[in-house]
Amino acid sequence: MRKTEFRMSTGTIKDIAIIAIIAIVGWKIIAADFSFTFENIRTSDLLSLLLALFAIGLSVALFIKANEISNMFYDNMYKFTKDNSELLGRMESGFGEQLRHLDQGYSGLRDKFDKLPLDLGKTREKVEDEKAEVVKLKSEKEELLNQLAERANLQEEEKQELFSRLQQSEAQLNRAERLMRRHQRKLRDAEDAETTINGVLVRAIKHTQRKVVRLLDIDDFESSDDDDIYNSWILIKDELPRVYLKDLRNGRVLDRDFLLTPKGIQFFRDVAAENI
């Protein structure tokens, strides 16, 4: 007759052991004597118990407070980071818009230069002719006023005719003055596009004075280190008009990578101090 094999897995043995331990501990608890009287408590034991309870309570209170402070810190850090991100976004947007207007302004100035007549002599002649025309029209206006004063007893129709002539003369004078100022600006811009100071075109110097010095955001160029001016230039150079950068490079203010040369650092100091 074949014997039946009995196998028991490790898991089953572990379960039986746990059940046995629980049964023993339970029996000990049931059989234990839990009778208690305050007479058996010594003062030192009571103090130890109270001190232990106080320590536990203090630890819990400190844990809760530390957790509260930690949460507050992370909330403040999140809010600070978020606010700074929004602020930097607005600053970047405003700065980019300012530089965009700067680029448009200088590009418009370049377009004006491209449309200027090549012969500056003719432009100067036009300005002189317009000055003479303005003088002539002013003289005619004075003459009409004198006639009006001498012939105050004119008939109504004659007065109206004289006033009409006076208004026409005034309109012609205004047009001539506007035309003269426009040609004077063209002449000045053309001269700025050809005239240099210390090798730098005047138009680039004027643009630096009006716009770029402010963008560099340096309070005192004279007392600032060369590195401060150099690093400030790096921050804005990529947003500046290309034609302006080429003007400065041709004047040795910038190198071939459009970075400031020693002459360029001194150039900005001189422009800021209005020494140019």
Image (cartoon, rainbow, N blue to C red):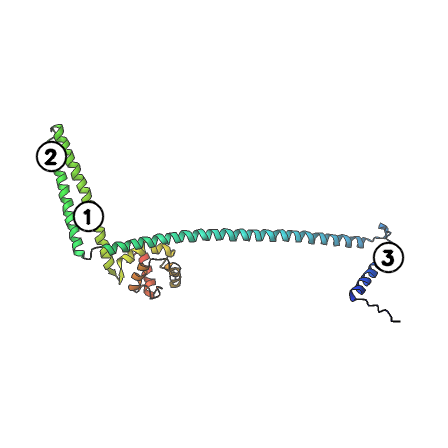
Q: Which of the image's four quarters has the N terminus? A: bottom right
**What residue sits 60% from the left and 52% below the top?**
71
Kind of residue at disc 3: Trp
Q: Is residue 107 visible?
A: yes
C-alpha separation, residue under disc 3 versus residue under disc 1: 118 Å
Label 1: few (<14), some (14–19) or many (≥20) C-alpha neighbours in 10 Å: many
Could you say which quadrant of the image residue 229 lies in?
bottom left
| Nearer mark to the viewer, of 3 and 1 | 3
The local secondary structure at tag 2 comes to helix
- Tag 1 residue: 180
Q: Is residue 243 above or below residue 127?
A: below
State the mark number for residue 147.
2
Residue 223 visible: no
Residue 240 percent across, percent down from the top left: 35, 57
Q: Nearer the viewer, residue 225 or 158?
A: 158
* Quadrant where the C terminus is found in the figure: bottom left
Give residue 7's quadrant in the image. bottom right
Q: Horizontally, is 67 left or right of 113 in the view?
A: right
Which label sits in the foreground, 2 or 1? 1
On screen, residue 109 above or below 170: below
What amino acid type should be assigned to the residue bearing mark 2? Gln
Q: Which residue is mark 3?
A: 27
What crowding class fits label 2: few (fewer than 14 Cα within 10 Å), some (14-19), or many (20 or more)? Answer: few
Q: Earlier in the sequence, mark 2 or mark 1?
A: 2
Q: Secondary structure at mark 3?
A: helix
Q: Residues within 10 Å of mark 3 (few under 14, many from 20)?
A: few
89 on left or right of 271: right
